[in-house]
Amino acid sequence: MADGESPPWAELVPDIVREIGRHLLCEIDRHHADGLCRSWRDALLQLRPPPPPLPRLVLPEADGPAFYCVPSGCRPHPFVLPPAALRARCFGSYDGAWIFQAVDQAANHVLLNLITHQQLNLPNLLRFHSFMLPALTFDFEVAFVAATLSSRPTDQGCVGAGIISFNRVPHDPRHIAFWCMGDEAFSWSIQMTRNIGGALELDVVDLLYSSHGAGAFLFLTRREDIHVFRQPIFPQGDVMQSTPLYFERRGDDDDDDGRPVLDRYLVESRGKLLMVVRLGDREPARLPTTTFRVFEREDELFNNYWTKLPDLGGRMLFVGRGCSRSYEAADGYPGMEGVYFLDDRSFHDPMVVHMNAADRQYPCSDNGRWSGAQPPAEVELCFPEQGRSNYSPPPKNVFLLTIY
């Protein structure tokens, strides 16, 4: 093409350009189309804005994390990250492009904004006061496993909650802990004790902040019960009150079909609390995730139940520990309902973060979408297959809600 000559696509009639633009559901793709030439920009200005943005799903690659966009056909979009963030372990995210990272695997925990590169320090210590000498304190190093926040981290009074583990203690049950943004140590923690016989049913598997009422942190256990902690106000006393919500056991009619339960997640959708159950296959040689079941919380007087939903009803559920979100296909994403998930099997290995780089292995191949269709439909592996990573598992979902 000679200098000064218009590109061939500049001659497309505006109606065709607008038809192309209607299929660009990602605002980054729409922005790139705007920049092709003036005639395209003028034509696309007559379209409605793209639908509300969806989360980017992050997968670790050899040269750092890649940010995949569902509306863009599960293709990656580039983001420039600080050098220290390229090899950090990720353990969650928060709205507004905030991502939780451990720069040194089991230490140096930070909250990084992927757009502004603002970095906020997170606690690395759990501090205990001596019973005999209250002024005497003991600090223990801990590693974050998952985390969430009560509000934007820059808001005054923002409180964080996390699932943590003590360094190099393989059989110690995980703790849940709370802190006020800006604190160097956790303000309060509790060990989720296992029941008699060493069963794992009380181990915490997910957390969520619910803004209903006065606000509360919800922790889901393997037994599918919930522990409710009202939002703490710091500084506080030695005792933090929690309310356990015990749920009736799900029966055989919930259609697990003998499949093993791999994981459970909490997500709020349409004003209701949902539990998303991730099921594996009876054949261990296959990829772990084969289907999902979605349950809604139902209350009857003193009893709580998980009631299975017959279908997704147009929901788009992005599941990740501490950062699950629900969207509506009717808001501009036709045919995209489903459960979108990443590989987080390493959550169940408490020692992986303490291994050296040569031995450390984070599985990264079990990523995709379950459409919610009836059997024999299974999951669709819609993201590029990844080998194992030695610096981070797929870090749940990263929410880039404001790009420009």
Image (cartoon, rainbow, N blue to C red):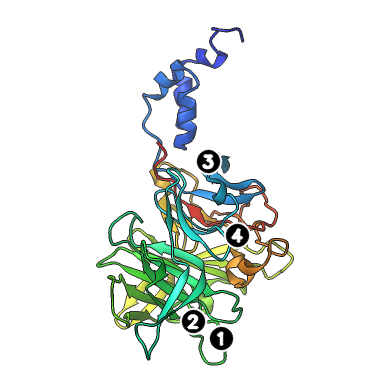
SS class, disc 2: loop
Q: Identify residue type, mark 4.
A: Asp
CA distance separating discs 2 and 3: 39 Å
| Residue in view at x 70 percent, y 54 percent | 387
CA distance separating discs 1 and 3: 43 Å
The mark that comes first in sequence, 2 or 4, is 2
Read off the residue under disc 2. 202
Read off the residue under disc 1. 199
Q: Which of 94 and 354 is in front in this view?
A: 354
Q: Identify residue type, mark 1.
A: Ala
CA distance separating discs 2 and 4: 23 Å
Relative placement, left or right, of 41 versus 1 is left
Read off the residue under disc 3. 79
Q: Give the percent coordinates (x, y) of residue 155.
A: 30, 55
Q: Identify residue type, mark 2.
A: Leu
CA distance separating discs 4 and 1: 25 Å
